[in-house]
Amino acid sequence: MPPNPLPTLRSRTTAGRVFWTGMVTLAVLLGLAFYLVVSHQVRKAEARRTAAQVQQTAFSDCLQYVVGSTIGTCTSRLGLQQSGAEVRSAGPGASATADATAASPDAVRTASR
């Protein structure tokens, strides 16, 4: 007696349904994960932007309302970092080199030993 083709067809259909259900579930989960990552990054970027605006406002208020204030005093008072140009020009060994060139020749000879 020849085998019945219906069970084979049913098993293929069931396997196909399971496969496509798994693929759709995977696509939905990947979309959800992508959304969560992007929304977290957007929140972090908004927080950084807000913090920068607050620092800028505090800095301008310091310059405007504190008597005798300078850029340097407001920067140190607010605990801000140096500007990007100053940070880039001062590498890891730049402060030691600057100190050595500002010192007297005797101090440079002693420091180089």
Image (cartoon, rainbow, N blue to C red):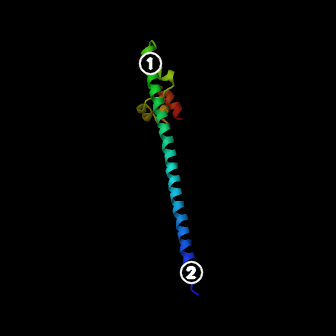
User: Label 2 crowding class (10 Å Cα cut-off): few <14, some 14-19, many 20+?
Assistant: few
Q: Nearer the viewer, residue 56 or 82?
A: 56
Lateral position of residue 62 relative to residue 2, left or right: left
| 44 versus 70 height, above or below | below
| 44 versus 81 height, above or below | below
Q: Residue at x 45, y 16 (%)?
A: 69
| 70 versus 100 height, above or below | above
Q: Position of residue 73 (x, y in %)?
A: 47, 19
Lateral position of residue 32 relative to residue 85, left or right: right
Q: Position of residue 87 (x, y in %)?
A: 45, 33
User: Label 1 crowding class (10 Å Cα cut-off): few <14, some 14-19, many 20+?
Assistant: few
How far apart are the alpha carbons under marks 1 and 2? 87 Å
Rendered image: mark on residue 61: 1
Q: Position of residue 109 (x, y in %)?
A: 50, 31
Q: Which numbered disc flags the more N-terminal residue, 1 or 2?
A: 2
- Name the residue type under label 2: Asn
Q: Which residue is mark 2?
A: 4
Q: Position of residue 95 (x, y in %)?
A: 48, 31
Judged from the image, the secondary structure of the residue bearing numbered disc 2 is: loop
